[in-house]
Image (cartoon, rainbow, N blue to C red):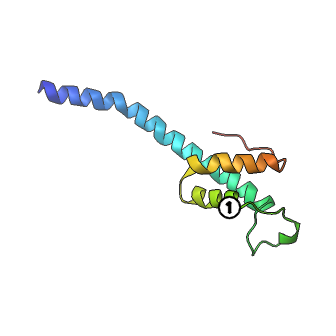
C-alpha cells in the first residue's frame, strides 16, 4: 500500500509540469502558425497566391519551416520564420 501511495504522490508532483509543457507546446504551435501566416501572406506565397508578382522572393529554408510548422514541429520552425520575417522588416506577433 505504501508503494502505491508513493507512486500516486510522484504522479501528482509531475502532473503540473506535464500540463505546463502541453500548454507551452500549444502556445508554440499557435505562435508558429501566426508566423507562417505572415510569411505566406507577405513573402512566400504559393503559386496560387493572387499577388504573387508583388511578393518578395521566398526563402527555401522558410518554406521548409512553414511545412514543419504545419506538421507540428514548432521548435524547429520558429527560429527560421522569426529570422526571415525580421530580415524582411516585419514586426513579429506577440507570443503566448
Q: Secondary structure at mark 1?
A: helix
Residue at the disc numbered 1: 63
Q: Residue at x 80, y 59 (%)?
A: 42
Residue 86 left/right relative to 13: right
**Nearer to the camera, 60 or 71:** 60
Looking at the image, the residue that sits furthest to the front is: 60
| Image quadrant containing the C terminus | top right
For image coordinates 56% across by 46% down, the residue present is: 75
The percent coordinates of residue 94 (x first, y second) are: 71, 40
Residue at 67 percent of width and 49 percent of height = 80
- Please name the residue shown 79% across and 60% down the image: 43
Query: How far across and down, in percent of the image, does residue 23 sit?
Result: 51, 40
Q: Residue furthest bottom?
A: 48
Q: Is 44 situated above or below 81?
A: below
Q: In which quadrant of the rendered image does the N terminus lie?
A: top left
Vertical comparison of 65 with 89: above or below:
below
Amino acid at each position: 500500500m505504501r508503494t502505491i501511495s508513493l507512486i500516486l504522490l510522484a504522479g501528482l508532483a509531475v502532473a503540473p509540469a506535464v500540463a505546463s509543457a502541453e500548454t507551452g507546446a500549444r502556445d508554440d504551435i499557435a505562435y508558429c502558425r501566426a508566423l507562417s501566416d505572415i510569411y505566406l501572406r507577405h513573402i512566400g506565397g504559393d503559386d496560387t497566391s493572387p499577388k504573387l508578382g508583388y511578393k518578395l522572393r521566398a526563402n527555401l529554408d522558410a518554406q521548409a519551416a512553414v511545412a514543419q510548422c504545419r506538421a507540428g514541429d514548432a521548435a524547429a520552425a520558429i527560429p527560421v520564420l522569426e529570422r526571415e520575417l525580421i530580415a524582411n522588416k516585419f514586426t513579429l506577433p506577440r507570443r503566448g
